[in-house]
Image (spheres, helix red, strand yellow):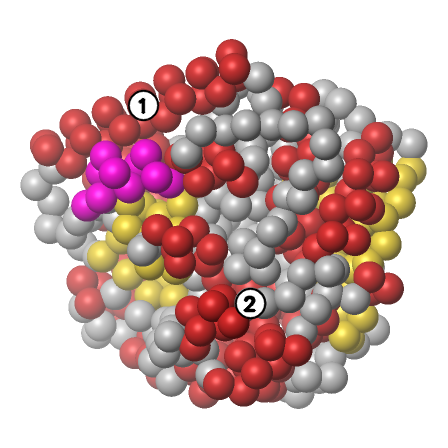
C-alpha cells in the first residue's frame, strides 16, 4: 500500500479497532470484574526527542476531538463477536461506547508534553494506544519524505531476506513465529499497513499475527495479545486481597473470565522471581505460557524452564512469548537458544514499524492510580519502573523483597 501525505487535516485514527487486542481483553475483564474502578493514566516520554513534543499539543487536541467522535461500526462489532473469548454483553457495551472528551486533558510544561486520562477505568483505559499512535504519527510527519520511505523499504527488504534465509536453514523442533506489535510507536498507520503486507506476503510461515485488531481483520491475520501491566497493577489497588497476593488475585480473575483462552501470563510487574513465587502448579497448568517484557531474556527463559520442570510440567507443552524491545537479530538469537525446548513466539514492535532512519520515540502511557491509590511497576530492567509515590514504591519493594538498585522512579514528565 503506497504512502501519501496531504497538508490538510488527516485523522490518524479512523477505526476504533485500530488498537491492540489486549486492550479489548483487559477491557472485558475489567467491565465484568471491576466496572466501578476509577483510574488515571499518564503519558511519559522516556527518550530525549530531537524536536519538542509540546509543539504538537494543538494538533493532538484536534486528533483526540476526532477520536471522541468515533463509534464502533456494526461490521467491527460483528468481527469482535466472532472471537470466541469476546462475550456478547461486552459487544453490547461497545456498541454504545464512545470516548468522552472530558476524561482526557492535554497540556505542556516547557518542551514536555503532558497527557492525562482520568475517570472510570472502563472509559479511559482504551485511550492509551490511540494517544501513543497519534503522538507518534504527528511527530514523524516531518519525516514523511520519499527519501525516508525509500530507506525504510530498503531496511524492510533486508529483514525479509534475513527471515527467508533463516527459515530455509532452520531445523529446530518448534517453528519461528513472529507477530507485529508495532502499533503504538509506528511511523504511521499507512507504513504499518505496508510493513505487515510485505512481511505477510514474503514470509507467511513466520509472520503469523498482529496485535493490531484492524489489521488482523483486514488482512486475515491472527489478532494477538492477552494482558498488559495495567491489568495486574490495578489489582494492587482493589483491596480485594492483601498486596502480597495481588498477582494471584489478578491471575485467578483472568482464569475465571477466559476459562482456557488467552493463556499467556505477563511476568514482570514486580519481577520474574516474585511472579514465579505466585505461579504455582495450579496456574502453571491453567496458563498456556508466559510473556517476557524486561530483563535478560535468556536468564528469564532459563528460570521459566526450571520452574516448569520443578513442577513436573514438560516445557514443550508451554509457550514463551518475547516482546521486550526486540529486533530480528535479537529474536533469532533467543529462538536459537530455546527452540528445541519450548514453543516460542515473538512480538516485535518499533523495529518493524518505525525503522526508517529517524530516531524513534520511546513513549508510553501508563496506569499511575487506581481507585485513588498509587500503582507501581517493578520490572527486571532499570529505567522501566514507574510510580510517583515513593512511600508506596518502598512498601511494594519490601513486600516482594525487591532491592532499590534496579532503576529510578519515573515522574510523569521524565
Q: Quadrant of residue 288?
A: bottom left
52 lies left or right of 364: right
Which comes sooner in the sequence, label 1 or label 2?
2
Can residue 293 be seen by looking at this rendering?
A: yes
Report x, y in % for residue 71. Answer: 64, 66
Is residue 322 in view?
no
Q: Which residue is mark 1?
A: 157
The reply to whether discs 1 and 2 touch (Cβ–Cβ < 8 Å) is no
Residue drawn 28% across and 41% down?
Answer: 200
Q: Is residue 5 above or below residue 408?
A: above
Task: Looking at the picture, tell me which residue is in the foreground, 228 or 243.
Answer: 228
Quarter placement of the C terminus: top right
Q: Quadrant of residue 37?
A: bottom right
Task: Where is residue 43? Give x, y as percent.
Answer: 74, 48
Considering only vertical position in the picture, is 344 above or below 196? Answer: below
Q: Residue at x 89, y 45 (%)?
A: 107
Frontmost residue, 154 versus 253: 154
> In the image, is residue 198 above or below residue 72?
above
Around disc 2, counting alpha carbons within 10 Å, would you say few (fewer than 14), some (14 to 19), or many (20 or more)?
A: some
Q: Which secondary structure class fits the magenta region best? A: helix
Q: Quadrant of the N terminus?
A: top left
Q: Which mark is residue 225?
A: none
Residue occupying image coordinates x 79% and y 53%: 65
Q: Tag 2's secondary structure?
A: loop
Q: Residues within 10 Å of mark 1 (few under 14, many from 20)?
A: some
| Residue at 31% across, 55% down | 220
The reply to whether the magenta stretch includes residue 163 is no
Read off the residue under disc 2. 73
Q: Looking at this view, is 240 or 167 the one in front?
A: 167
The part of the chain drawn in magenta is 196-205
Q: Position of residue 317 (x, y in %)?
A: 20, 67
Where does residue 20 sit, x and y in percent of width and height? 51, 57
Amino acid at each position: 500500500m503506497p504512502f501519501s501525505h496531504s497538508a490538510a487535516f488527516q485523522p490518524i485514527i479512523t477505526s476504533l479497532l485500530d488498537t491492540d487486542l489486549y486492550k479489548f481483553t483487559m477491557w472485558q475483564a475489567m467491565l465484568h470484574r471491576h466496572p466501578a474502578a476509577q483510574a488515571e493514566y499518564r503519558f511519559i516520554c522516556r527518550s530525549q526527542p530531537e524536536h519538542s513534543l509540546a509543539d504538537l499539543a494543538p494538533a493532538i487536541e484536534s486528533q483526540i476531538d476526532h477520536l471522541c467522535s468515533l463509534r464502533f461500526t456494526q461490521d467491527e462489532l460483528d468481527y469482535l463477536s466472532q472471537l470466541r473469548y469476546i462475550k456478547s454483553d461486552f459487544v453490547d457495551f461497545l456498541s454504545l461506547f464512545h470516548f468522552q472528551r472530558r476524561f482526557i486533558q492535554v497540556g505542556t510544561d516547557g518542551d514536555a508534553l503532558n497527557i492525562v486520562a482520568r475517570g472510570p477505568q472502563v472509559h479511559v483505559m482504551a485511550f492509551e494506544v490511540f494517544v501513543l499512535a497519534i503522538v507518534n504519527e504527528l511527530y514523524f510527519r516531518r519525516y514523511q519524505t520519499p527519501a525516508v520511505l525509500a530507506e525504510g523499504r530498503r531496511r524492510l527488504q533486508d529483514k525479509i531476506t534475513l527471515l527467508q534465509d533463516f527459515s530455509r536453514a532452520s531445523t529446530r523442533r518448534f517453528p519461528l513465529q513472529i507477530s507485529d506489535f508495532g502499533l503504538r510507536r509506528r511511523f504511521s498507520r499507512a507504513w504499518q499497513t505496508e510493513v505487515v503486507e510485505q512481511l505477510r506476503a514474503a514470509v507467511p510461515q513466520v509472520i503469523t499475527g498482529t496485535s493490531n485488531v484492524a489489521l488482523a481483520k483486514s488482512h486475515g491475520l491472527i489478532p494477538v495479545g492477552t494482558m498488559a501491566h495495567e491489568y495486574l497493577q490495578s489489582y494492587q489497588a482493589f483491596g480485594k486481597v492483601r498486596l502480597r497476593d495481588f498477582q494471584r488475585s489478578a491471575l485467578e480473575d483472568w482464569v475465571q473470565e477466559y476459562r482456557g483462552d488467552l493463556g499467556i501470563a505477563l511476568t514482570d510487574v514486580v519481577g520474574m522471581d516474585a511472579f514465579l513465587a505466585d505461579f504455582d502448579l495450579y496456574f502453571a497448568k491453567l496458563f498456556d505460557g508466559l510473556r517476557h517484557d524486561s530483563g535478560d531474556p535468556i536468564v528469564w527463559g532459563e528460570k521459566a524452564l526450571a520452574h516448569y520442570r520443578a513442577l513436573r510440567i514438560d516445557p514443550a507443552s508451554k509457550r514463551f512469548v518475547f516482546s521486550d524491545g526486540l529486533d530480528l537479530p535479537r529474536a533469532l538469537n533467543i529462538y536459537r537458544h530455546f527452540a528445541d525446548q519450548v514453543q516460542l513466539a515473538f512480538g516485535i514492535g518499533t523495529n518493524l514499524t518505525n525503522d526508517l532512519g529517524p530516531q524513534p520515540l520511546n513513549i508510553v502511557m501508563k496506569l499511575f492510580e487506581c481507585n485513588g491509590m498509587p500503582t507501581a511497576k517493578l520490572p527486571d530492567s532499570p529505567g522501566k519502573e514507574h510510580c510517583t509515590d515513593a512511600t508506596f514504591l518502598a512498601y511494594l519493594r519490601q513486600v516482594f523483597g525487591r532491592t532499590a538498585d534496579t532503576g529510578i522512579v519515573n515522574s510523569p514528565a521524565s
